[in-house]
Amino acid sequence: MNVLISGGGRTGARLANLLLNQNYKVRLIENRRELLGYLHQELPTEVIYEGNPVDPSVLEAAGVREVHALAAVTSNDSTNLAICYLGKTLFDVPRTIARVNNPNNAWLFNENFLVDVALNSADVFAHLIQEEMSLGDMMTIFKIRRGNYSVIEEKVPAGAKAIGIQLKDMDLAEHCVIAAIIRDGVMTLPRGDSTLKAEDEIIAVASAEGAQKLSDLLAYPVYPMRNGKKKE
Amino acid sequence: MNFIVVGCGRVGAELCYHLFKRGHQVVAVDINKEAFNRLHPDFRGRTLEGEGLAEGVLERAGIHEADGLAAVTNSDTLNAVVAHAARIIYNVPNVVARNYDPNLRPVIEAFGLQTVGSTYWGAQRVEELLMSPSQRMVYSAGNGEVEVYEVQIPEAWDGHTLGELLEPLKQCYPVALSRAGHSLLPESTMRLQARDMLDVSSTFEGIGTLTARLSQKAEA
């Protein structure tokens, strides 16, 4: 697969390295003097093409007509939008991917500018943090089907709502299956009448909704929050 | 009419004042509020601090009611993107994007936008005046690729036909012939008189060949 990366900041360089390691054919366009030195340390010389990443003649000279995907990852949102639009209208690029720098500009990254995929780093990061907070000790082992489903692992804390309820009564059916319970180091395959104890670890396959339900059942009990020192 | 001007630099501030003087409602948008200091002291339009790409900023500028939007910042991609959004998302009837860097003119053209390149246009105008001060440009089409020039017929061509003068020339077409304050639609059989004013539609190369020919003596 051939990929053209427009804009070579840290994101562009990191992406190029990642793709090169997977044997993609990669070209990266950058014209900022202060970045080219850094890029030449990070990447093989033949990968780097010097020029303005939004100039159509530069895109063409860098081989945009032969790529399967064009990634517009400069630090300027209007430049990223223009790169995607030019890639599709002038060069028939099959797939365009753009970085959103300012979340306020995300509303433009769609079919109006021929952006196939928009990646909003602030948004992705905020969601990850929120997920970490809301899902407590839940750990995602891996994601399936583009992240719509996950295999997750979680420890059952003392006081959690789920303790003592039979699995079949947990109302998880459509969104979540508990695949294994690990108790005192021994794994068992649960049945509908199995129940959980504090300190059990469970492994489940769940949709995002299912993971949220499970996390509510396995959450630490909530106490009212007070300001100042904890009362003795 | 209601106009939005995105970018209040030299071009933007001047444009805002022109539109305001003609009695239009103008909103000047710029990310930097210091930029509004460039506006003429008599300007009585609205100023709005914010990024032209932000949905909220465009809406507060009244883009739903705008009759026209000019994107005249010094970023070609920003101008192209704001103008394209105004046209595609908000159906603003008249949209113009400024071309700042002549190398990036193809970017604005790829969006199919009306554009004015002040750098390129200014340089060409100065070049014309330097090269041939005798002719006068009366109208400039597009980005100045085709222009209408006014030239005076010298004694040497008195009594010759318009066809004799123009037929050997390429890229130069007659538009009007004015004599004693009246103008006529030109035909190639018309006989020229000294001091007739001839308007021609021409490229920069075309007007060069015409002025060269006028300064020669006509063939007998």
Image: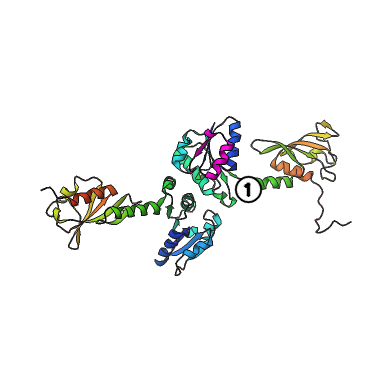
Q: Is residue A44 magenta?
A: yes
Q: Is residue A18 left or right of residue B191?
A: right
Q: What is the x, y in percent for residue A68? A: 52, 34
Is residue B117 visible from the viewing direction of this image?
A: no
Q: What is the x, y in percent for residue B32? A: 53, 59
User: Can you say which quadrant of the picture contains the C terminus of chain A?
Assistant: bottom right
Q: In the current view of this chain or complex, which residue is farthest to the right?
A: A232
**What residue is disc 1 on?**
A122
A188 w.r.t. B209: above or below: above
Indicate the quadrant where residue A11 lies: top right
Q: In the current view of this chain or complex, which residue is farthest to the top?
A: A23
Secondary structure at numbered mark 1: helix
Q: How many marks?
A: 1
Q: What is the x, y in percent for residue A40? A: 56, 37
Is residue A146 visible from the viewing direction of this image?
A: yes
Q: How is the image coloured?
A: rainbow
Q: Is residue A77 left or right of residue B211?
A: right
Q: What is the x, y in percent for residue B182? A: 19, 61
What amino acid is found at the position of numbered circle 1 in the picture? Ala
User: Can you say which quadrant of the picture contains the N terminus of chain A?
Assistant: top right
Front-lying residue, B67 or A38: A38
Q: Is residue B108 magenta?
A: no
Magenta-highlighted residues: A33-54
Q: Residues within 10 Å of mark 1 (few under 14, many from 20)?
A: few
